[in-house]
Image (cartoon, rainbow, N blue to C red):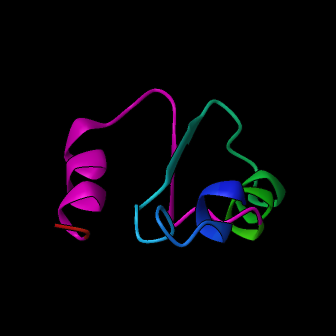
Amino acid sequence: KEIKADSSTSSIPVIALTAHAMDEHRQEAMDAGCDEYETKPVRLPSLLEKIEQFS
């Protein structure tokens, strides 16, 4: 939330990377200001796709 609240950093994309895979954890991350959510184990193609959408 702090990153998104600061005008100098609010445009930086935030991708949550976590072992928590339940829907409620994803929603908590999104509510906290994350732009995307990826669970472990990391699937590189999926992570790269999410990164590319912000570039």
**Residue 44 part of the magenta-drawn span:** yes
Q: Is residue 45 magenta?
A: yes
As drawn, 10 above or below 49: below
Choose between 14 and 49: the one closer to the eye.
14
Q: Position of residue 41 (x, y in %)?
A: 46, 26
In the rendered image, the quadrant that contains the N terminus is bottom right
Q: Is residue 1 left or right of residue 43?
A: right
Q: Nearer the viewer, residue 47 or 2?
A: 2
| Magenta segment | 32-53
Q: Is residue 14 above or below residue 6?
A: above
Q: Quadrant of residue 4?
A: bottom right
Give the residue displayed 23% in from the left and 70% down from the top: 53
Question: Residue at 32% of width from left, 37% of height from top?
Answer: 43
Which residue occupies the extreme front position in the image?
8
- The quadrant of the image that shows the C terminus is bottom left
Q: Dividing the picture into quarters, in which one does residue 50 lie?
A: bottom left
Left or right for 17, reference 26: left
Residue 24, image x, y percentages: 83, 59
Question: Based on the displayed image, in which of its 4 quarters is residue 18 positioned?
Answer: top right
* Picture residue at 20% right of the left edge, 49% below the top: 48
Where does the image place residue 15, in percent across and percent down from the top left?
47, 52
